[in-house]
Image (cartoon, rainbow, N blue to C red):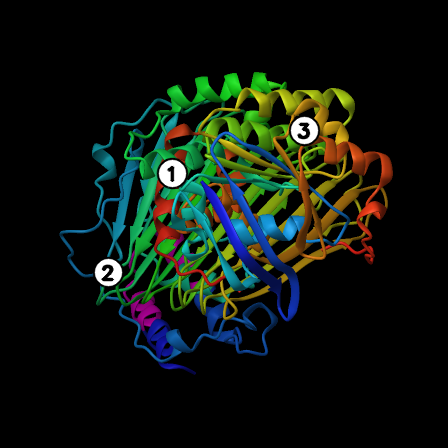
Amino acid sequence: MLSIQNLHAGIEDKSIIKGIDLTINPGEVHAIMGPNGSGKSTLGYVLSGRDGYEVTEGSATLNGEDLLDMDIEERAVAGFFLAFQYPVEIPGVSNMVFMKEAVNAAREARKQEPYTAGEFLKLAKEACKQVQLPLDFLKRGVNEGFSGGEKKRNEIMQMILLQPTICFLDETDSGLDIDALQTVANGVNSQRDPNRSFVVVTHYQRLLDFIEPDFVHILADGKIVQSGDASLALKVEKEGYGFLGINYVEEDV
Amino acid sequence: MNQWLEDVIAHADTQAAGHAGATWLSRQRALSLDKLKDNAWPTRRTEAWRNTPLKPIESRPALLSPMAISTWQEPAIPDFESIDIYIVGGELKTDISTLSLPAGISIYSLHDEKAAALASQFMGKIKPETHVFGLVNDVVADAGIIIDVAEDAVISTPLRLIHTATEGVENHSRLLVNVAKNAKVTILEHGIGEQESMNTSVSEFNVADNATLHHYRFAFFTQKALHVGGCHFQIGESSYLNSTIVAFGSELSKLNVDVNYLGEHAKVDMNAMYLLAEGENFDLQSVIEHAVPNGTTDEKVRGIIGDRARANFGGRIHIHPDAQKTLAELNNRNLLLSRRSLVNTKPELEIYADDVRCAHGATIAEIDETSLYYLLTRGIPRSKALVMLNFGFIQELINAIEDESIRNWLNNMLSNRFQSMEVQVS
């Protein structure tokens, strides 16, 4: 499904990702952990195609297609979904209109008829209930005035509606209280499917109690330094990254 | 003196000699002609015209002889029913005597002696004399209507005055509306055209005590259709004015809006939008005079400015010493679509009373790259994402439009206009 080979990328002249190899098969859940500044968010940006992030070496393919050669919106309709660490507030654009446009763009790419307003409203209401957001959030501006937790629920609602094939969740657990964490995790688990894969970026083992990963990777200084099963996350939780002998400078990218 | 003004004055002198028009009209034309002759023609040093050079007008002859035009644009608003009156080529094209009007409303032409009492009371007296093109319109506008809404009349069918630009002749239209006590009416002014021409349209509104006016002004003059217009309101005690202004730009397009509070407890909601495509110019100047206590103004102005387009906004709220307990808010926000888009904005509050609540502000922004990125990551095509972000910017004002048909029509039309606009995100 998603195959990343020897990926090198950075911003301007600064190299951030320094050779990542990662293969994600259908139905798998991969957790990525690692100290701040190790390149976790950058990986999400590079895979989604954000402007300013340049790939200097390596490749990434989604179902055999060159992901890096696609425009941002093409990657999305090809099935790549990025749940933002900091979802963007867009006042004036209603959440409903936003999601309907997004879902219908994906349907158009799949040669399906666009949903009518009525059909979509029904789906949106269901998804809204599933992430436990009040229905009036559909009418509000995209993330406008939402709390941190509400924004993350809104990301998961979009994921549920868009039905992507690979979901990259960038610290979706940060800033969530335990109930919101449970809701978000339930949302993710409800979407687990033999044909859908997840990359879950997190600092905390806690999320992985709810979303059980098949693989855990530790990213440090732009490289995967260790991979293992769920027990690796427990070890990190207990011991920190010291056992890996990582010397890192704390910085946010 | 420039060619155009010379022609205007010569035309007016000839007209005065021939005593054309109703008595009151001749009298007013003579008064305004004197003022026009005395009035200094604006230059770039005139504050009100600093950012809008008059060169495109000055260099052309004034084409003031009416032309018999038989076909013109009839802008339809789907599902919207209104009584439409056309002014084309300097002539009133609608036979107002044959209109079937609801009870409580009367319409007169500028030449109707029956309108003398109303005209003498209000015509030329609501607009400030400082507007040079208001004086020009006084002396040259021959096509116009006077609308009188009787006391207590609630008119549910909107009236629409359509003035269209045409090549080879100038279009100067005039409107006076009296909304008497407790009356309620909706008036649309719909200006449209792209042909090479000079156009003025001046409207005056008296909104009497406890009356309600819903007003729309669409200044859709584009390309080579030059336009200078004015909307001037005076509002009585406990009256309500709701005005929506939507403008595109042309080689030169300008609109002056004035509101004068005559009675206490009146309220004004004014929403203005200018949406300038490549190379267009538009200038909006609004002046709100809070002369009496307890008035409320909420003025929101949003502009989207395309590549090499230039917008100019001046908004002044003047709170007189007696105007205690005034609530006034003025807010102008602009979105620049390219590095070569330009806006000058100048919101002004002038306050001489001490017990008031006022706020004003202006912002200028570019398309937010992070917002665009967010929409794209959801698969929304770039062109649509840009339209959504632009629309987000003005949606609040469109949503505030009460009439559903107008709201839907503007939504579609403006969306199409955005899609054709080039956006550079840097």
Q: Alpha carbon of mark 3 to alpha carbon of mark 1: how far?
A: 25 Å
Whether marks 2 and 3 lie on the same chain = no
Residue A151: x percent and y percent? 65, 33
Q: What's the chain of the residue with tag 3?
A: A
Please indicate whether residue B75 sits to the left or right of residue A15 in the image: left
Q: First in sequence, mark 3 or 1: give its number.
A: 1
Residue B8: x percent and y percent? 35, 71
Q: Is residue B40 visible?
A: yes
Residue B36: x percent and y percent? 47, 70
User: Which mark, by number, is residue B166?
Assistant: 2
User: Which mark, by number, is residue A105?
Assistant: 1
Q: Amino acid at mark 1?
A: Ala
Q: Amino acid at mark 3?
A: Glu
Whether the residues at callouts 2 and 3 have beta carbons within 8 Å, the answer is no
Q: Alpha carbon of mark 2 to alpha carbon of mark 3: how far?
A: 55 Å
Task: Please rate how many residues cluster around mark 3, counting C-alpha atoms within 10 Å: few if below 14, some from 14 to 19, many from 20.
Answer: many
